[in-house]
Image (cartoon, helix red, strand yellow):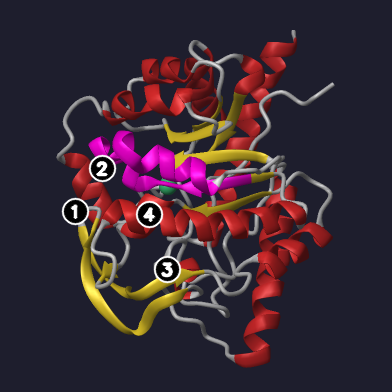
Amino acid sequence: MKKLLPTSTAGSLPKPSWLAEPEKLWSPWKLEGEALINGKQDALRITLQEQERAGIDIVSDGEQTRQHFVTTFIENLSGVDFENKKTVRIRNRYDASVPGIVGPVSRQKPVFIEDAKFLRSQTNQPIKWALPGPMTMVDTLYDDYYKDRKKLAFEFAKALNEEAKELEAAGVNIIQFDEPAFNVFLDEVNEWGIEALERATEGLKCETAVHICYGYGIKANTDWKKTLGEEWRHYEQTFPAIQKSSIDIVSLECHNGRVPFAVLGLLKGKKVMVGAIDVATDVVETAEEVAATLREALKYVEADKLYPCTNCGMAPLSRELARAKLDALAAGAEIVRNELST
Ligand SMILES: [Zn+2]
């Protein structure tokens, strides 16, 4: 029988301090050349071991080989100038130094395929691989060439689709597209965001997921959240169209936030990765707190479609904290699993 409530993480996990400066986004590598390649593989082995030890069912690379979940993919495409970075405002929230589009965008070579093959060779567990979503990519660079967000998104979707097909062939079970921008540009999501996402998943036979959240637990995001009012109803505006889309799984933020659980009811028929771990606090959830969030989600999501997860990536947290949160996630899921089987 298939295991109920399989656990996973939204994506990134902290890197070891010998590989990159800890608790920081866009942290520069501390190694170079051959040592960097080997160091990334060692970090991947460690993050996998930590997930498996905690009892996480669907494992990932913890994004150990990427500097950032969006820019690392973009920098590997042609048409992108990553030497002359410019500072832009990301998701209307914070400034970051990002690459720019200066010519036609295309994927000339695989980006993560070797990493995915390596992960596949190290575990028999199902693996999930995260790629940036087209809209979030568009929002994480400057564009001096297309000057049209939708057009650029579809160019990215084409490149993502090529990468996704090779990830599938490498043995990835779930390909996830990270779209935090879906909680910001609500009209564009419905106008072209979901369509671009479906272009990125075209022809895939493995499962597909979209991760939509309120961002990493960095100050710019937590400050933004304070301005969003008592109830966060962003999902309400995009889930009806996502429910009709071909995407199999929706990963969202639920724990500790102000998202009304009833929005989960808008995803009827989809599998839902329910964020039951807050990534924006240093407080470790108790197993019972995780279980309470999952029980609440079960009012709207069928048990065989509920996948306990983290609210977002844990890259900016300390390794010790991230490990404790993985343990809490697995333990909380186990409590509810036992309740369901009795
Ligand atoms: Zn996220």
The overriding secondary structure of the stretch rendered in magenta is helix
Q: Earlier in the sequence, mark 4 or mark 3?
A: 3
Q: Position of residue 63 (x, y in %)?
A: 57, 62
- Residue 276: image location, x then y, percent: 49, 33
User: Which label lies toward us, 4 or 3?
Assistant: 4
Residue 247 locus on image (x, y percent):
54, 33
**Mark 2 neighbour class, 10 Å CA radius: few under 14, some 14 to 19, many 20 or more:** some
Residue 218 vs 300, above or below: the answer is below
Alpha-carbon span between mark 1 and mark 3: 17 Å
In the image, is 166 to the left or to the right of 62? right
Q: Is residue 4 visible?
A: yes
Q: Residue at x 43, y 45 (%)?
A: 196
Circle 4: is it few (<14), some (14-19), or many (20+) Cα within 10 Å?
Answer: many
Residue highlighted by disc 2: 184
Residue at the image point whose x is 74% and y is 49% from the top = 52
**Disc 1 + disc 4, Cβ < 8 Å:** no
Span of residues in magenta: 175-200
Tell me the amino acid under the disc marked 4.
Ala
Calculate the distance from the C-alpha at mark 1 to the C-alpha at mark 4.
18 Å
Pick whichever of labels 1 and 2 is earlier in the sequence. Answer: 1
Q: Which residue matches tag 1?
A: 92
178 left or right of 163 in image: left
* Residue beneath disc 4: 153
At label 2, the amino acid type is: Val
**Which corner quadrant of the image does residue 335 belong to?**
top right
